[in-house]
């Protein structure tokens, strides 16, 4: 095992590392071939090979393994690529912040959210995120799975994220704070909901209805499958897979046989915006809580801290959370 001279590596990287080197590493990861990288950059393969050798000399070790199947990052390469992506994204964030100031706004945030987060709650948090010194906060909202959002938070694509912590989600380098638990609701069109509410639920019959559910492997889809399995019934195959709240509502109210299981706050929104109805039924539910995620390293921008505070307040004031707290 060779000795690692951190002082020498820092000296080399500080003196010689350029943005073009970082972009080169990311292109190699993308294409897995120096030939394809050379074609994209309109240069020769020897030039790309020499550039990679220059970068690897700064790090003091290979960043990619070469094989007949192409190039793949070494363990050190994975670390370098993660930091390279974050540094490139931070440069984009710098330009974004400059544009924000130039247009008279106070700050811009990139916020990641998983599907089935109350739009009303997010809207309330945004409206109460008031930058110090005046000005207006502008936002870009990104949707994705918790795992996708955590990766985007680590590589600095996102400033903050709202998702679910679980053993299946990589939260390395991140901090999270549980905000609230979501309780499930069975939703359907008004006529079907009235019929289902008049008698004890028969899960075998329910499985034959037209289900609208999220994608396989997501926490809520897995939980719905578990509900049926505990009842001794094979989980239904959905006719449509979607987490788009408005679309789900329209599909349910237009189909007398359509049903779904969604969190209580989303069910309330579907009642309000689409006219669905909630079937009175109490579920056992073991979903991970909704949580707020931030990066562990480095100071948090003031706008991030203000949004986090506003979201905490919005969660505590949400009707479905107040109602649940009143039960205890």
Image (cartoon, rainbow, N blue to C red):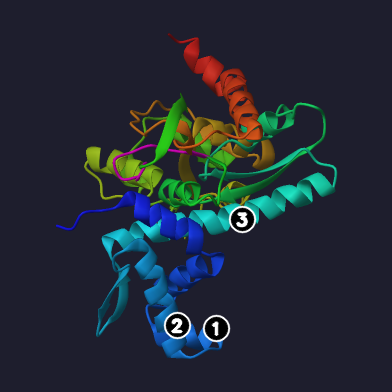
Q: Please provide percent x and percent y for residue 188.
A: 52, 41
Q: Earlier in the sequence, mark 3 or mark 1?
A: 1
- Name the residue: 55% across, 23% down: 320
Q: Earlier in the sequence, mark 2 or mark 1?
A: 1
For the C terminus, give its image quadrant: top left
Q: Label 3 belongs to which residue?
A: 91
Indicate which disc residue 48 carries.
2
Q: Label 1 belongs to which residue?
A: 41
Q: Please provide percent x and percent y for residue 250.
A: 63, 50
| The image quarter in which residue 189 lies | top right
Q: Is residue 94 left or right of residue 235?
A: right
Vertical placement of residue 34 versus 210, above or below = below
Vertical placement of residue 177 versus 196, above or below = above
Whether residue 129 is visible, yes or no, is: yes
- Provide the residue span drawn in magenta: 161-171
Instruction: Give SS at disc 1.
Output: helix
Instruction: Give SS at disc 2.
Output: helix
Vertical placement of residue 296 versus 147, above or below = above
């Amino acid at each position: 095992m060779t000795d690692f001279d951190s002082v020498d590596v820092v000296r080399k990287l500080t003196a010689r590392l350029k943005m073009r080197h970082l972009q080169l590493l990311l292109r190699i990861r993308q294409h897995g071939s120096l030939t394809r990288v050379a074609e994209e950059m309109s240069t020769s393969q020897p030039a790309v090979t020499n550039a990679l050798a220059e970068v690897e000399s700064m790090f003091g070790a290979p960043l990619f393994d070469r094989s007949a199947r192409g190039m793949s990052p070494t363990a050190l390469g994975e670390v370098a690529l993660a930091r390279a992506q974050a540094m490139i994204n931070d440069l984009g964030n710098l330009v974004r912040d400059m544009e924000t100031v130039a247009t008279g706004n106070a700050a811009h945030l990139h916020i990641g959210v998983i599907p089935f987060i109350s739009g009303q709650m997010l809207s309330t948090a945004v409206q109460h995120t008031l930058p110090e010194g005046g000005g207006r906060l502008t936002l870009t909202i990104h949707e994705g799975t918790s795992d996708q959002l955590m990766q985007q938070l680590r590589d600095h694509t996102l400033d903050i994220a709202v998702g679910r912590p679980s053993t299946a989600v990589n939260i390395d380098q991140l901090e999270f704070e549980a905000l609230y638990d979501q309780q499930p609701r069975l939703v359907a069109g008004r006529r079907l909901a009235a019929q289902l509410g008049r008698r004890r639920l028969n899960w075998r019959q329910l499985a034959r209805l037209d289900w609208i559910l999220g994608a396989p492997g997501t926490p809520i889809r897995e939980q719905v499958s578990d509900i049926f399995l505990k009842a001794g019934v094979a989980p239904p195959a959905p006719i449509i897979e979607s987490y788009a709240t408005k679309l789900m509502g329209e599909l349910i109210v237009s189909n007398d046989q359509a049903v779904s299981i969604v969190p209580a706050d989303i069910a309330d929104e579907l009642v309000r915006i689409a006219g669905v109805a909630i079937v009175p039924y109490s579920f056992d539910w073991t979903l991970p809580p909704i949580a707020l995620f931030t990066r562990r390293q480095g100071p948090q921008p003031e706008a991030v801290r203000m949004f986090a505070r506003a979201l905490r307040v919005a969660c505590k004031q949400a009707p479905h959370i107040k109602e649940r707290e009143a039960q205890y």
